[in-house]
Structure formats: structure tokens, C-alpha cells
Amino acid sequence: MGEKLSLRLKENTEILDEILQTDKNFDIIRKGIVTGGRDACIYFVDGFLEESIMEKLLEFFYKLKPEEVPLSASQMAEQVIPYVEVSVMPEREELLKNLLSGVTCLLIDGYDACIGLDCRSYPMRSVDEPSKDKALRGSKDGFVETLVFNTALIRRRIRSSKLSMEMLTAGKISRTDIVLCYMDDRVDRRLLRELQGRIHAISVDSLTMNQESLAECIYEQKWYNPFPKFKFTERPDTASAAILEGNIVILVDNSPQAMIVPTSIFDIVEEADDYYFPPVTGSYLRLSRFLIAIITLLLTPTFLLLYQNPEWIPRWLEFIVIKDTVHVPVVWQFLMLELAIDGLRLAAINTPSMLSTPLSVVAGIVLGQFTVDSGWFNAEIMMYMAFVAIANYTQSSYELGYALKFMRLILLVLTAAFDLWGFLAGIALTLYAIAGNKTVAGKSYIYPLFPLNLQQLKKRFLRLRLKEETEQNQK
């Protein structure tokens, strides 16, 4: 239990002024008022206050008569104050936490509790469609950095009393708000209790990087396995669909992304467009994405293997043989281009928007024609790496794209060093990294392939009609 507030207003304000350092912090404001013949004081953080609402509340407090003031803070909050979001905080620690979160705190002489008025308004951007998580059809809204708006976007789509939004906090100093969203009648109770326990057990000062910090705290095993353990989305419709399937969606304040658990490799490959198109088109898009992911992993290592063993190339594929002189070993060309592509990607992120187009054109020309003419790279190598670089963007998950990239690099090195046996070892290592991975719930990362569930496996590869999917989910 925290320290209780005093009945004397002066004693409370002296302690709070010292803790909050109101003489130094210009944005923490204390305003003294008189209501119902009693001295009172309001604390708030400048920038979080909805001024129009506060003006009306102040007008009410100034007009309050002494006989209208009840004996306790709880009666004042429940029976007198004409506002919806009102709470009573008897402890100083609770007061400080809510105040620094943006809640306006009212202290009245003779009350041993603080009255919280939640009339905050956070600075926020509009709920536009996320630039990365786009869909050709469907809704064009997206999550923002304000938690309450994100929960509202989900509530708007799931109008059920079974939808639960459970608030937790983590970080000794930051006290970051975390919301677990789930359907009360569909969620895995064991996983829910485990997540609650892990979040309560977090002992860090702050979740500095929001969801990534939270992910590292609640899943600490096998950091060296690059395949993602969580699915991230900025789309409220994707998050809502995951909740209806029995998953848990984790929202973190100050983050515009939702974290979906548990997540398998098949969940990560899925996208919203799979469901916004008819079943035939949706199935084609999903299967294309699977196929392109496999090609991006195997294309350059396979070409390297055939280059090292030209006698294996069938007559109808002889056109893939490099005809020009190879000045730099092929494996080093692939490795340098892998690094160069990441360098261009990082440069594009940090380039001002007005310069990004001309600089991209210059980079394309230099890395294209000039590097081939100079002898550093061969045209065939440039073509295959260009395909791989573009095909990586068929995956909405950055984490999965980089996981495939890391495994491709390992495949290239092993193939160059040990030829066919290295190629086979690299594929075996990739399969082990995928199959040996575990979800947050500790279950198979490749379910429903293992353990085998044919009905669910069919659903993962083919986009079924809504009625069929609903029936399978109910089973």
C-alpha cells in the first residue's frame, strides 16, 4: 500500500510541489481555486489538458455552494461533479502516476483523497492508412501513437461484450501503459495468464523502444533464431480479425503497431489483401507470396551452385552461364550486393523526400551500368540480386524479410565453401531454424503442418469463403 493523502490541503500541496518540482517544471501547473467555501487546488500537465472541458468544470466549481459540498471525495465524484470520467485516488503514488499520464487532479481541503478528472487530450496525428501496411481494398485507417484511439478502432469493429481490453503497466520509471485485447470466450486462458505474469515480472526502468522492448522482455529464448516470434500490424482490421480467431493483441502506448500472439510462420505470411479479394484471387496472392519467399531464399545460392558445377546445367538452361570474364569471385559479388542493397535502403530512409527520387536514379545508374562496365560485377549477378531486392518487399513483415536474408547469406557462404554438401547443409539449417522455432505460447511454429491438421493447413494455403472459415474457427 502506498502513502495516503492528508486531510489538510496545505500539507498535500507542499509534498506534491516538492516531488513534482513545480518551481522548475514549467509544464506542471498548480492552480488554486475555491469551491463550496473550501480551498482547493488543481494539478495538470500543460499540453495534455482539453481546455474547453476544463473551463466548464471550473465554472461549475466556482458556483458550487457550501451546502452542496458532500462529506467525502467519493460522494463528490459520484454525486456532484457533472463529468463522466471521474475517479478517486486516496494514495499519493496513484495520484502521481495519473497526473503524469495527463489526468487533471483536484485536491480539496478536508478530503483525504484526490479526485481525478480525465479530460486529457494527447497530441496525435490522424488515423490515416499506414504507409507500410497498405491494402488495395478495405479500410484506409491505421493505428496511431495514442492508446485510447487504438482501442476505439478495435471496439468499432468488434461490438461484443466478450471483447476484453485489460490494462497493465511496465517500466519502473516510464510506467508505460499496455493493453491486452482478446475475446473472453475464445482466448487461450493458459497463454493469457502466462502473458500477464511475464508483463508483471518485467523489471526495467523503461520500455524505451515500445513494442520491441516489450517483445524482448516477454520472449527471451533463442535470440539467435532470426525468424520472428510476433506479428506486427498497423491495421485495425487485421488486429480485429486476429482477436476473433482467438489470438491476443497487445497494444503499447506511444506505438502505432499492434503485436499479435501467438504467431506461426503461416500467420506472418498472411496479408489483408488475401481477404479483401474473392477466394480465387486471395488464394493466388497467398500462394504467390509463399512461392516468391522460397525463390528469394534459394535463387542466388542455386545459381552459385550451378556456376561452380556447370556440368549440371541442362541444355535448355545453358543461357544462364556467365559469358563475360569474372574478375571478382561470384560469391563475393553476391555478398557485396547484399550489403549494398541494405546501404541503399538505409540511405533512402534518411534522404529528404525532395531528394529521394533523383538520388535513387543516380544510385540505380551507378550500381547498374557503370559497375558492370567496370568489371566489379557481372550483368547476370546484378539481375538476380535486383529480383531478390524487389521480391523481398512482397513480405509485409520486415522481420521475416531479414530472416530470409540471413539464411540466404549463410547458404551462399556454405555453398561457396562446401559446394553441394554446403548447399544441402544450408537448406537443412534453414528448415531447422523454422521448425525449431517456438511461438510465445511454446507451441509449434509451423502449425498446422506439425502437428498435422489438414483442415487448418488447407485454410493456411487457400483463401476459403467466409462461411467455411467461420465453421472451421468454431470447431
Image: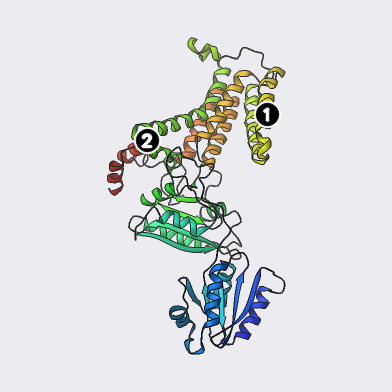
Determine the image quadrant of residue 254. Answer: bottom right
Instruction: Using the rendered image of the protein, determine whether residue 137 is visible from the camera's viewpoint.
Output: yes
**Tag 1: amino acid:** Ala
Residue 390 drawn at (x, y percent): 55, 30
| Image: 54 above or below 235 | below
The answer to which of 243 and 315 lies nearer the viewer is: 243
- Among the two numbered marks 2 and 1 on one chain, the one whose residue lies closer to the N terminus: 1
* Label 1: few (<14), some (14–19) or many (≥20) C-alpha neighbours in 10 Å: few
CA separation, marks 2 and 1? 38 Å
Q: Mark 2 against mark 1, which lies toward the viewer?
A: 1
**Tag 2: amino acid:** Phe
Q: Mark on residue 461?
A: 2
Instruction: Using the rendered image of the protein, determine whether residue 71 is visible from the camera's viewpoint.
Output: no
Circle 1 — which element? helix
- In this figure, which residue is indicated by the disc labeled 1? 363
The answer to which of 212 and 394 lies nearer the viewer is: 394
Look at the image and name its color scheme.
rainbow
| Image: 330 above or below 281 | above
Residue 369 drawn at (x, y percent): 67, 20
Circle 2 — which element? helix
The answer to which of 295 and 44 lies nearer the viewer is: 44
